[in-house]
Amino acid sequence: VGLVALAAWGVVDAAQDVLAGRAPRLWQPVAGMAVLAVLKAAFRYGEQYLGHLVAFQCLEILRARLFTALAPRAPRVMITARTGDLLARATKDVDRIETFYAHTFAPAV
């Protein structure tokens, strides 16, 4: 919104300068737009970084709990399921949670 408003102000200001017979002063709106663009990029990076930080911390906790819950059952689980299937199922479910936290929940907040 700020970039669009600044661009509109720059166009109106330049048109007024041209109508008044002066050379348009474009450096002010261009400099403002550049500053806002850099700030937008920095805030977007911060949002992505913090969203992924929270998501991976949640994954760390979930994987630790999953391992703690599966370790005592290992002999029985090994008889009924193949280890690759169990690992794939567990990590796929946990990775889906990463997608939710990092790419859905964080940008919405």
Image (spheres, helix red, strand yellow):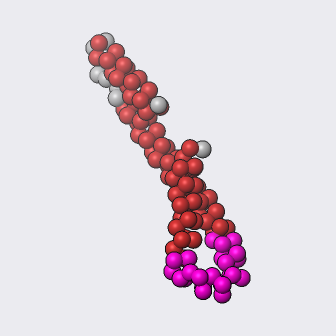
| Placement of 69 over or under 101, stated as above or below | below
**What is the quadrant of the C terminus in the image?**
top right
- Is residue 25 among the parts visible in the rendering? yes
Is-magenta flag for residue 40? no
Figure quadrant of residue 25: top left
- Camera-side residue of 94 and 78: 78
Figure quadrant of residue 108: top right
- Camera-side residue of 17 and 106: 106
Residue beneath the point at 67% across and 78% down: 70
Point out the stretch of residues depicted in magenta: 63-86
- Where residue 86 appears, as percent x and y from the top left, is 56, 76
Figure quadrant of residue 75: bottom right
Residue beneath the point at 29% across and 22% down: 23
Residue beneath the point at 66% across and 84% down: 76
- Where residue 104 appears, as percent x and y from the top left, is 53, 50
Is-magenta flag for residue 82? yes
- Is residue 17 among the parts visible in the rendering? no
- Where residue 6 appears, as percent x and y from the top left, is 43, 28
- Camera-side residue of 57 and 72: 72
Residue furthest to the top in view is 20
- Where residue 45 appears, as percent x and y from the top left, is 50, 52
| Placement of 21 over or under 34, stated as above or below | above
Label tally: 0
Position of residue 109 in the picture relative to residue 103 (left or right) = right
Predominant SS along the magenta part = helix
Residue beneath the point at 49% across and 43% down: 39
Position of residue 18 in the picture relative to residue 105 (left or right) = left
- Camera-side residue of 51 and 30: 51
Position of residue 6 in the picture relative to residue 107 (left or right) = left
